[in-house]
Image (cartoon, coloured by chain):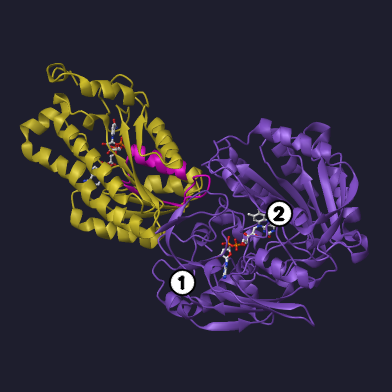
Amino acid sequence: MTFLTGWGRTAPTPATLVTPRTSELAALVTGALPRGLIARGLGRAYGDAAQNAGGVVVDVAGMEARWSIDPGTGVVTASAGMSMHDLMTALVPKGWFVPVTPGTRHVTLGGAVAADVHGKNHHVDSSFGAHLRSLTLITADGTSRTLTPEDDLFWATVGGMGLTGLITEASFACVPIETSRMRVDVERTRDLDHTLELMTATDDGYRYTVAWIDLLARGSRMGRSVLTRGDHARRDELPPGADALAFAPASRLAAPPWAPNGLLNRLTVRAFNEAWYAKSRERTIVQDLAPFFHPLDFVDGWNRVYGSRGFVQYQFVVPSGEEATLRRIVSRLSERGVVSFLTVLKRFGAGTPGMLSFPLPGWTLALDIPAGQAGLAGLLREFDEWVAGAGGRIYLAKDARMRAELLPAMYPRLPEWRKIRESVDPEGVFRSDLARRLSL
Amino acid sequence: MKNALGSVDSVLLLGGRSEIGLAIVERLVRDGARRVVLAARGEAEEAAVRLKNLGAEVCLLDFDAARPETHGEVIDSAVEFAGDLDVVVAAFGVLGDQASYEADPVSAARSMAVNLGGHVSAGLFAARRLREQGHGALVVFSSVAGVRVRRANFVYGAAKAGLDGFAQGLGDALHGSGARVMVVRPGFVVGRMTEGMPPAPMATTPGAVADATVRGLRDGSETVWVPGKLRPIFTLMRALPRSVWRRMPR
Ligand SMILES: Cc1cc2nc3c(=O)[nH]c(=O)nc-3n(C[C@H](O)[C@H](O)[C@H](O)COP(=O)(O)OP(=O)(O)OC[C@H]3O[C@@H](n4cnc5c(N)ncnc54)[C@H](O)[C@@H]3O)c2cc1C
Ligand SMILES: NC(=O)c1ccc[n+]([C@@H]2O[C@H](COP(=O)([O-])OP(=O)(O)OC[C@H]3O[C@@H](n4cnc5c(N)ncnc54)[C@H](OP(=O)(O)O)[C@@H]3O)[C@@H](O)[C@H]2O)c1
């Protein structure tokens, strides 16, 4: 038995962790009851999505990997266990970039499909599922099926958190790039309204945008932000002689193996926020892909800085027009002095047909909060109600604490998804702690 | 499943009418638990209605601690209703009266069969299930009466001493399985079980015991004393010479 947690390092449970050959998967799946089986990528979901107490967990990231690209179309076919890091290392020097990347490169292709991940380009390019051409899925009966966007099971699997089967391979369309650099505009905003206004007005001028919010700023400065907006740099924007498609992210620093609980407290976070805001004067810079998309990846295991109690990420989306709910939550957070080290605001564009996909057109806010903070459970529960009431939802890939009751309101296509899952996996072979907790 | 902030979804109460047990369940339900099983030897409708009003689904089961051969089935039925058991609270017990036990030895043995024997079978059946699921907590109600057995209530005290040892051993047996045992050692609790008795020093209440239990579950404690100051006090008590201890009035 191996104890597993998500990235937030809360609620560990033991499972039999296996790294099978592809040819062994069918037997493993059909023999997985009573406790069932779930796929695990690189464990970057924050909560319990890739855990299965007392059952089997398949380490897909450890399985053999292959990939190929059609140089004419830029469509890549790759094993589900390959990471975005591996894919970028292979693709960028050839002049291709992944269609969507989350805030870390250390996620697998399977994890990106199962959570239908979004990136800074969601307002223009939607989420990962929009770029998928086909999937290969091992279902509960042990058979391997190839699915395309015409299949209902395809859209039950995109965003389906591993509960329809185990993805072994996926094909997706990449984006051509001239360079491995980003041209980035940095700008500060005064307060939340200014942030929303500026994002609404200027988002469409950039492929990638995000705002970092200083949640500890209060009063008239509540919601003040640093906005970064960028595009892939063109060849002619680089100094002559530069290796335009070089991709070699700086080697990673290791976070200390242990940190005291409470290291990230109101004082330290406030000091950090002040410094960050102060240094982020308006400017345009050209930077590498990695610091623009994955700034946190420079410190290996940064999640340990939260101490032994771990942390939760709270990420919700509310539809456009429901800015009042966003404002209400931000002001309550700021009023309560909730310590969130990284708070990120992003405007979403159109969603995909994924039945349990998270994104919908509107505003998403993501905050990292130490799990030991007093009164946190009640506060977040209150937010859940507001979010559900506004027609919004919580991101399952980040969740570690929500209750089952609000799920149908947040995910109105849940019945449709359940029906498909029921038909393809009547006994519930594919199970996770998340599925148990949320009665999925 | 216990979530990242320590809330649970399901709870089984063995001794489904216990005042302390119900106070714990009520707190867990207020904190989000939705599937509750009350396993009681008598009628528990009233408690069920109260918990339903708080939003829980409640299942009632017959449970007699003195019939160990039925305990496996009780656990199975609870699982059938609730799925994985996140918390199992074993709160049944009889206090009885020392003088009556001495006058009627058969009744003393019967109380022992509930206070110790019943916990052994129910506890082992519950632990088997928790081990299979790879998570969950079994809460066992010991008592300071068992920490050092007193002349004034040695039948009850001996059962609790045995139970405390059993629960610690069971907890060690489950170590590494993902499941665990939490031993709760209350002092004198002013409530239904002690009705009519003059409170001992540092007496506590069912609500306070429940608060401490819920906190212990959240923090992953192995042992909970209520009130907490009984722990250092009993460290001293254990060191008192027999000649003094023997004369403890109650
Ligand atoms: C620093 C950081 C930043 C992040 N930023 C973003 C962001 O900007 N946008 C975003 O959308 N997400 C973001 N995430 C979340 C992350 O992208 C998702 O949780 C993603 O699913 C993690 O992939 P993984 O390979 O680590 O999967 P895991 O965490 O191991 O698993 C996640 C889910 O995917 C399922 N799964 C994994 N592999 C397979 C497979 N082969 N077949 C079937 N199911 C599978 C698992 O069962 C589980 O339900 C971020 C996470 C971190 C830690
Ligand atoms: N109260 C205290 O001062 C105190 C102090 C330390 C430890 N404890 C322990 O804490 C636990 C909870 O006590 P409490 O205060 O909640 O007392 P309580 O309200 O009297 O609860 C005890 C429960 O056990 C049940 N029970 C007794 N015999 C049973 C049997 N054969 N089968 C099934 N159920 C049986 C009783 O059922 P009925 O309702 O049908 O009678 C009662 O509901 C007990 O283990 C007790 O020993 C209590």
Q: Which mark is residue A252?
A: none
Span shown in magenta: B2-28
Secondary structure at numbered mark 1: loop
Tell me: is circle 2 under 8 Å from ligand 1: no
- Residue B22 seen by the camera: yes
Q: Residue at x 75, y 37 (%)?
A: A273
Residue A227 in the image: x percent, y percent? 83, 48
- Residue B12 seen by the camera: no
Q: Nearer the viewer, residue A132 or A255?
A: A255
Question: Which residue is denoted by mark 1 in the rendering?
Answer: A429
- Residue A419 higher or lower than A112, as above or below: below
Distance Cα–Cα, label 1 vs label 2:
41 Å
Chain ID at mark 1 = A
Q: Residue at x 33, y 36 (%)?
A: B184
In screen coordinates, is A21 left or right of A297?
A: left
Q: Nearer the viewer, residue A340 or A34?
A: A340
Chain A's shade in the image? purple
Residue A151 in the image: x percent, y percent? 65, 81
Chain ID at mark 2 = A
Q: Amino acid at mark 1?
A: Val
Question: Which residue is denoted by mark 2 in the rendering?
Answer: A250
Q: Residue at x 43, y 39 (%)?
A: B214
Chain B's shade in the image? yellow
The earlier-in-sequence mark between 1 and 2 is 2
Crowding around mark 2 (Cα neighbors within 10 Å: few <14, some 14 to 19, many 20+) is: few
Q: Quadrant of residue A175?
A: bottom right
